[in-house]
Image (spheres, rainbow, N blue to C red):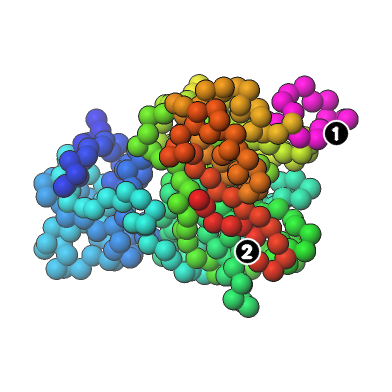
Amino acid sequence: MPFQVQLQPSGRQFSVESGETVLAAALRQGLMLPYGCRVGMCGACMATLCTGRIGYGDETPLALDDSDIAAHKILICQAIPETDLVLETRELARARDIPIKNLPARVQDIEPLTHDIMRLRLKLPDSERLQVLAGQYIEILLKDGRRRAFSMANAPHDDAFIELHIRLVPGGEFTHTVFDEMKPKAMLRIEGPLGSYYLREDSARPVILMGGGTGFAPLKGMLEHAFHSGIERPLHLFWGVRARRDLYMQELIRDWLAVHPNFRYTPVLSEPAADDHWDGETGLVMDAVARAYPNLSGHDVYMSGPPAMCDAGRTRFLEFGAPIEHMFSDAFEFAADTREKLGSA
């Protein structure tokens, strides 16, 4: 039988399966509790055990000293309940509650997703994990002081690696480095998480997610987080690209469709090639959204992609009844000597 954990002072409760850590269970159920390394070394997840009993396996975590133990402090990233628990800990409610870190990162692997999009996975030091909200971004710090910002495509619970989708851009110095020179084990420096573009989990409204090109990346993180957390409200992904070859990770999306009945997917091609044999939606992705949802007054709308797409989408969706406070966007653009992604709005 699962154990029940109550958090003080909020009074929130959640269940923990046998052998599961308190932190893993909380994140799985959409509760944002502070943590850092997830291996018991940093102490960022320390909480006070008010009632109940926990175990750590073979060894007490390194970040706990004798005075902590005497004060009934525990590390929830390693603590496994042996009874029902009452814990005193703070909860993170918004992006500003999560610490921004400046860290080294090693390139784990590089994989082409399309002819001009590369997936880059970054590994942080063993003693570090990056706590994020689904949809946020990081900045890669270049040696000359410039920064390149990219949305994270991995969900918060899937934090062993940071996943980025990087499009090759004419004149984009960093993107050409990624495509032409970067190898696994290369070292980078990152800062994050950043941005106020993230999935609002306190809403019960159906969700429309509209992406253009690599704007799919933060939406992927949002969707995987929603699936992992058991969010049951309707989720409809609209993804606009130029031609069929620009769609990637289609097998993953088919898996989502097979497993999650609350999920729908509409790809939209603006300029399908003759050999695409395309019988799906064409034109502008925002028009496909408007055709499917002529009344958006009851929806949350998330948009990520080029600024022109996000700006036009916001204007169009206002006309279709979408409340401005329920529209969220992450607009980015590329340039040779400026940030390759503009922050969230």
Q: Position of residue 42 (x, y in %)?
A: 33, 65
Q: What kind of element bears circle 1? A: loop
Give x and y (percent) for residue 171: 77, 64
Q: Quadrant of the N terminus?
A: top left
Considering only order in the chain, which callout, 1 or 2, is on the residue closer to the N terminus?
Answer: 1
Q: Residue 320 occupies which quadrant of the picture?
A: top right
* In this view, 308 is above or below 172: above
Tell me the distance, in whole angstroms, between the alpha carbons under discs 2 and 1.
Answer: 31 Å
Q: Does residue 275 belong to the magenta stretch?
A: yes
The residue furthest right is 274
Residue identifier under label 2: 339
- Let me know if residue 273 appears in the view: yes
Horizontal relation, residue 212 to residue 151: left or right? right
Q: Which of the labelled discs sits on residue 273, or is there none?
A: 1
Whether the residues at callouts 2 and 1 have beta carbons within 8 Å, the answer is no
State the residue in front, 80 or 302. 302
Look at 63% across and 46% down and name the residue there. 305
Front residue of this view, candidates 169 and 295: 295
Q: Amino acid at mark 2?
A: Arg
User: In the rendering, at what x and y percent does residue 139 appear?
Assistant: 55, 63
Q: Which residues are magenta?
A: 266-282
Can you give x and y, in whole percent of width and height, for residue 110 in the image?
Answer: 67, 56
